[in-house]
Amino acid sequence: MRLDILNDGYRPGTKVLFTIIRVFSGHPLPDAAKLVFYRPDFYGAAAKKFTHAAMRGASDWSVGDRELMAAVVSQVNDCAFCVGAHTATAEQAYRDEAKVLAVLTDLDSAPIEDGLRATLRMLSTLTRTGTVGAEDMRAVLSAGVTPRQVEDALAVCAAFDITNHLADAFDFELPSPAGFKAGAKFLLKRGYR
């Protein structure tokens, strides 16, 4: 059920900011961005900081890899908004739509490195079941993924598992394909701040 707060639960200055963004971008502000402006002291500021660190902080995973992780977690959670947003962002980050589509269609045959494949499998299992075991971690580590990369991937998973559930709970509106592409361009330029 979509709550009215996403439409009008903001201070006048924030509403003006949303209008300016719409005028300059040609697209309405996505609901994910609106959500962080609603009660920023309770959720927004902490969520932006954590998500930005997970997605754009120092990591041996590329930005494209982390955006792909977000898309895969979102796909497992069946969150249409986040699948669209992070598929578009991964495609732009990699500059390779076919690669992203291949991963989301059939992970086993997708043209990606074994370490990323093993990590995406582990994140899928964690998202679907809520747990992973020693065998799951051994498979990731034996594929050449470092413990630090595992931590970084788990941070991406945590950020988007929460965001997926919020997107569905608040019934985020789906942008047009052009809206998703514009949002992806913004995320690649500015991150999640």
Image (cartoon, rainbow, N blue to C red):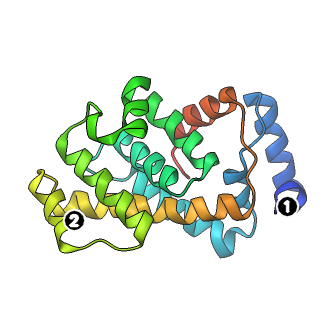
Q: Is residue 129 left or right of residue 39?
A: left
Q: Residues within 10 Å of mark 1 (few under 14, many from 20)?
A: some
Q: Is residue 153 left or right of residue 18?
A: left
Q: Find residue 32 and report its horizontal and vertical position in percent.
A: 67, 53
What residue is drawn where x is 64% and y is 71%? 43
Name the residue that disc number 1 marks: 10
Foreground of the two, 30 or 2: 2
Name the residue that disc number 2 marks: 136
Q: Quadrant of residue 103?
A: top left
| Element type where label 1 sits in the image | loop
Q: CA distance from mark 2 to mark 1?
A: 44 Å
Closer to viewer: mark 2 or mark 1: 2
Q: Quadrant of residue 10?
A: bottom right
Q: Please state which amino acid type lies under the numbered disc 1.
A: Tyr
Q: Is residue 71 left or right of residue 140?
A: right
**Location of the N terminus (image quadrant):** bottom right
| Element type where label 2 sits in the image | helix
Q: Please state which amino acid type lies under the numbered disc 2.
A: Asp
What residue is drawn where x is 43% and y is 48%? 72
